């Protein structure tokens, strides 16, 4: 009986030792990390010119007001289909318009006003200038918000390239912090934010008869072309790297 207990004790002891040894050798390696920021600043040329055409009609009869507006806008879009532009309806509204009467001290209902607006853009700014000159000064048609911008298909690859550069900037900073004994290894996580000058209005114009009054942020050069600042793009990243 004693011999049996001794053998069982030895077996249990060996099992405990093996279990402890197995746990030590298979314990997950603790990963050391470093979190740093990176930045990329770039600029992208503005390659499209846009303008807003708005039709505004007023009539006592709602149906007539809407019909006049849609017919005028149909004439505009028929012309726009003959030139190389992209267009998108940005406003379609019909509402009761009133005006304050200072004599009677109450609001007078003027009728039903209908507003339809379409944004038109082109790669060639001369096309937009021709459109402006064609419709400026016409009854019930208002032309404005002339501007230049960077198309999304142009901006997207520039943003992707800048994002990659920002991550590399973060890696460079990480290597500088852990040098000389270590270096940044595998990228474990990354988050980023962007800012762009497109969020602020540039190249705004207003119509004065058939002429243009140009804002300070954009000008016409001697050849008649619209000149505007490039779109400024900034990408900031927060990246976590494994320390090797």
Image (tube, helix red, strand yellow):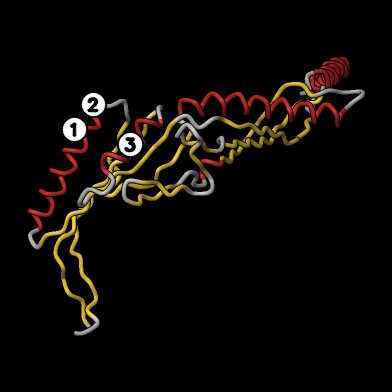
- In the rendered image, the vertical position of residue 37 relative to residue 67, given as above or below: above
Q: Residue at x 26, y 42 (%)?
A: 135
Query: Which disc is residue 126 wearing?
Result: none
At label 1, counting other C-alpha atoms closer than 10 Å, the crowd grade (few under 14, some 14-19, many 20 or more) is few
State the quadrant of the C terminus: top right
Q: Are marks 1 and 2 in contact (CB under 8 Å)?
A: yes
Q: Residue at x 79, y 22 (%)?
A: 23
Q: Position of residue 177 (x, y in %)?
A: 86, 32
Q: Is residue 92 visible?
A: no
Looking at marks 1 and 3 on the same chain, the residue that comes earlier in the sequence is marked by 1
Q: Nearer the viewer, residue 190 or 209?
A: 209
Q: Residue at x 85, y 20 (%)?
A: 17
Q: Quadrant of residue 77?
A: top left
Q: Position of residue 185 (x, y in %)?
A: 77, 21
Q: Quadrant of residue 187?
A: top right
Task: Report the residue marked by disc 2.
Answer: 82
Q: Position of residue 209 (x, y in %)?
A: 31, 50
Q: Is residue 230 left or right of residue 123?
A: right
Task: Report the residue marked by disc 1.
Answer: 78
At label 3, counting other C-alpha atoms closer than 10 Å, the crowd grade (few under 14, some 14-19, many 20 or more) is many
Q: Is residue 97 left or right of residue 214?
A: left
Q: Position of residue 211 (x, y in %)?
A: 36, 46
CA distance for labels 3 and 2: 13 Å
Q: Are marks 3 and 2 in contact (CB under 8 Å)?
A: no
Q: Nearer the viewer, residue 205 or 5?
A: 205
Q: Is residue 181 visible?
A: yes
- As drawn, the residue found furthest toward the front would be 222
Query: Which disc is residue 120 wearing?
Result: 3
CA distance for labels 1 and 2: 7 Å
CA distance for labels 1 and 3: 13 Å
Q: Is residue 72 left or right of residue 160?
A: left
Q: What kind of element bears circle 1?
A: helix
């Amino acid at each position: 009986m004693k011999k049996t207990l001794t053998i069982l004790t030895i077996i249990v002891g060996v099992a405990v030792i093996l279990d402890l040894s197995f746990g030590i050798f298979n314990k997950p390696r603790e990963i050391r990390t470093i979190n740093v920021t990176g930045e990329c600043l770039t600029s992208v040329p503005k390659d499209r010119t846009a303008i807003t055409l708005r039709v505004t009609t007023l009539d006592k009869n709602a149906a007539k007001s809407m019909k006049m507006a849609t017919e005028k806008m149909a004439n505009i879009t028929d012309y726009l289909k003959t030139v190389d532009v992209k267009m998108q309806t940005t406003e379609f509204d019909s509402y009761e318009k009133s005006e304050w009467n200072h004599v009677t001290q109450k609001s007078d209902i003027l009728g039903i006003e209908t507003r339809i607006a379409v944004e038109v853009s082109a790669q060639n700014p001369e096309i937009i200038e021709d459109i402006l000159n064609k419709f400026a000064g016409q009854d019930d048609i208002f032309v404005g918000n002339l501007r230049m911008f960077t198309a999304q298909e142009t901006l997207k690859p520039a943003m992707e390239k800048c994002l990659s550069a920002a991550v590399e900037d973060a890696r460079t900073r990480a290597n500088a912090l852990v040098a000389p004994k270590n270096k940044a290894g595998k990228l474990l996580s990354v988050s980023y934010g962007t800012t762009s000058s497109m969020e602020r209005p540039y190249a705004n114009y207003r119509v004065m008869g058939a002429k243009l009054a140009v804002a300070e942020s954009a000008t016409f050069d001697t050849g008649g072309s619209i000149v505007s600042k490039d779109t400024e793009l900034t990408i900031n990243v927060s990246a976590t790297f494994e320390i090797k």
